[in-house]
Image (tube, coloured by chain):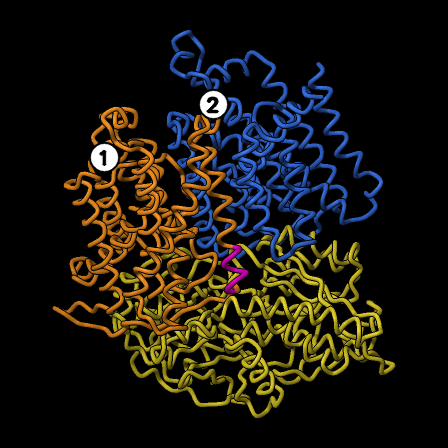
Chain colours: A orange, B yellow, C blue
Amino acid sequence: MDTLLSGQMLFAALVSGSLYALVALGLNLVYGTLRLLNIAHGDLVMIGAYTAFWMISLFAVPPIISLVVAAALCALLGWAVYVGLFRRMLAKPELAKRVEANSLILFYGISVILQNLAALAFTSTSRGYQYLDTVITWQGVSMTGNRLLTLGIAAAICFGTILFLRFHLFGWGLRAVIQRREAAQVVGVNLNRVQLLTICGGFAVAGVAGVLVSMTEQITPFMGFPFTIVAFVVIIIGGLGNIGAGVLAGFCLGLVETYGIALTSPGYRSILIYGLFVGVLLIRPEGIFTKAVRS
Amino acid sequence: MKGPTRLVNAALGAVMATMTAGAAFAQDPITIGYSIARTGIYAAAAPSQENPYKLWQKQVNAEGGLELPDGERRPVEFVSYDDQSNPANTVRIYEKLITQDDVDLLAAPWGTPMHLALAPVLQRYKMPMVGNTAASVQLRNVAPGYIWFPTSAIPDAMGAELAKMMQAEGVETAALLANELPYSQEFRSFLIPALEEVGIEVTVDESYPPDVKDMTSMLVEVREAAPDAVVAMTYPADSFLFAGQARELGIEAPFVMSLIGPTIDAYRKANGAGANGIVSSAHWSSEADAWPKGQAFFDAYVAEFGEEPDALDSALAYMSMEILQQAVAEAGLDPEVLRGAIAEGTFDTINGEVRFDGVQNVVTPTGFVQIQDGKIELVWPEAVKTADFAPKQGW
Amino acid sequence: MKNIGLILGVALAVVAAAVPAFGTPYMMGVVFQVAMWIALAQSWSMLSATTGYLSLGHAVFYGVGAYVCVLLTGTIPFEWALLAGAVAAAVFAAIVGLPVLRVRGPYFVILTYGLSELVRHVVMRIESALGSFGRMIFDVPRTEVLMWWMVGLAVLATLGAYAIRHSRFGAGLAAIREDEVAAETVGVPVTRLKLFAFIASAIIPGAVGGLALLRTSYFEPAQAFDPVISFTIVTMALVGGTETVRGPILGALGFALLSELLWSSLPQLYMIVLGLTLIIFILFVPRGLSGLFGRLGRAG
């Protein structure tokens, strides 16, 4: 019981929760505005992780700066993917009709290409580096520097994005596109611009998450897929396209994981998470934090 | 830019190789076929196996080629395909290598499932193959004949040896954390009775799924139990997680083991001094004076690939090629004669002498290594150790 | 009738083309592989092509079949174990079908994926609780026998898919794809039809899983429920085209042969080329290979 209430557990839950929320945020933006099932999302995390690794190994640039580089790289990729592929796809009625199926396969192709390009260029040997790994103890809670940094940056980006969407005019436009696509166009939202910026933003966020992940995990070309899955779990629990609820759901997943393991046994970790995922889809597919207004 | 440079080097190397092959070697090359997981779940493990193959090839060709019984030397050429980490593909690839590509010799794929799936294929086509990166008690169920396993990291022997080692180091209580993947679970199933036998009490015993992302609750439990030893039966991905979080929580046990992972170069780069004192499974160290070839292999590997060889997989992969090389020098390329030579012979490898009885290497002792000052030292068993076990001094 | 002739023609052609080379085990392996993907993609199309419910979790039926089969081999002849695998997959589909099929659109896609992963983790947990660490099978049938079984399953799946499409049942499913709510209002027993389609699409993958297991003679849950299987099925079916029965055959054949070709000639690059091919296909050949051939046929 003491363990359950300890700050140590809460810290662990918040760190994983913030990372889940961040990874899911990017996916949710892309799904919300473009209705694209981006299963290459985790591979962007991989690109972010490699960016951080090469930056620190070759140029001794710390990850805190690589954050920007990774975000820019992934945003560029987002731009290329949108302009090169998806604008074309969304413009063809024949393709746009089955947007889920088509985007799934397109992104599957992109995912395969990214993974194998990385393997070809960097070999699939696992990589790792040391950064900010001094342990700080505060009020009996031990925190590794890089995990604290992860929590800080991930939470800041998540809540910053929510505030931006709520208070900035662009955010209004974006929310309008998510909620009522056709109506948004009628009232003068530049759909093309919103979509382009969102996909860049969504990809950039994944790149940032990759930099954070690289500080504590091994880096390989095939590390991305689990992140794709976690992101889907989170946005399903929150509700597809619902940005704020997705962030909340990310933190919830962190809590469920940490406390769920503590209350049952670590062996049930994945069963718990996928059980929750399947349960939510069966009972409330619109997400548990969404008011069931939209059909 | 190391990555791209390597790519260019590889391309140049390939071109050069073709050119020199045309000029220097008039003889037919000897082809060696294998499959490797370039993509999929095992891909990260593949270079630790394929790099030694490439190094061995380069060394052999530099000597003029692979020696045959009549003293003739022929260059070695590899034929390899990606099995996408899928044993069904492995089976198909070896059938192709044997029947279509008509390779002269075979080298092993990565991992226990692949080796097990291959055993019947080798039997059917009567092609010998020296295995390497497979370890399971189930290997003993494989009908002896065309496949051999040089590893001594078989879970039952390891369980018994680890218990002995822990007893020798004065461990009285132990916490066990095990990944749910087969190798860890197998090891756990043999370790628990072995610990009981030597009177070591198990105070924590948890299994966790391979996609675990946070170990805090498990490690808090371990910290409260304050055992003398923590045995984490990890795979590479979770070995990083375990080290990071055990460090964060300040696990103070003097004996900390992480099953697979610590011998990987990147692990030590990611954990720095924190990795010191961690025990892991491997039965080879370049530091051993008894195995003079070990240091030469280590140095050549570092020079070639810019990182250290994995003490487990890379050593085994290289050993399997040494065995093949010596058997070919003795018996030539006829599969049946070669089979006899491998089955009956005694080989001199970077890991010392190797001899097979049935499918298993019966010489190399089951051992454990410890990271000391960033180096991999063999600390068990007594007979071959390169350094004494040193209790872990913090992270 | 012209259609069924064509389908059988294609199916027979696959077999016949390979007959002269049947002597070589490598060809047997290729035929086994191609037939496996035809059987899987065709089964998938029984649900997903007809109703538009896109399943991204067909690996679950494959895995359940493989698991049941490995538990039973050694105790009963392998033919019966395969049958048991198929039945187990069907029973599983029947149990989860009703709640799962209430979910629609992108949610269904993600749900089927999640379900497959959930079952994979449950099986892993069971195996670890049983103290089993990967199961080996001894005395597997010869490759030739396995290949013929797989070809049989591919033909069966194709006939099944054809029968469904050209029946009242299939017409009902098509109505669901066009507009489920409207179909329900005009009295189509929507729920029942979907459930039947779901079960039908699960049976053959169950047996395929068992056969694939016999080929590798080793079972490990992580491999039997590998999500890549699900992705590959969907990819092949969509590349082939979902509008006709020959679509999945063309997709599986085209994809498997292409990868066979690339795989040995461009070992480093073939996955990248495969990825590019996928992208090009979706963008420029939206109706798949069968649509492409149909158009060429009309033009000529």
Q: Position of residue C18 (x, y in %)?
A: 79, 39
Question: Residue A173: which disc?
Answer: 1
Residue C224 vertical placement versus B72 (above, below) = above
Q: Type of residue at label 2?
A: Leu
Q: Which residues are magenta?
A: A116-122
Q: Are marks 1 and 2 on the same chain?
A: no
Residues tagged 1 and 2 counted as in contact (Cβ below 8 A): no
| Residue located farthest toward the left when viewing the structure as drawn | A139
Circle 2 is placed at which residue position? C195
Residue A24 vertical placement versus C97 (above, below) = below
Q: Position of residue C231 (x, y in %)?
A: 52, 41
The answer to which quarter of the image holds residue C154 is top right
Residue C118 part of the magenta-drawn span:
no
Residue C166 vertical placement versus B251 (above, below) = above
Name the main secondary structure of what is drawn in magenta. Answer: helix
Disc 1 to disc 2, how far (Cα)? 41 Å
Q: How dense is the environment of label 2, judged by Cα within 10 Å: few (below 14), some, or many (20 and up)?
A: many
Q: Position of residue A295 (x, y in %)?
A: 28, 24
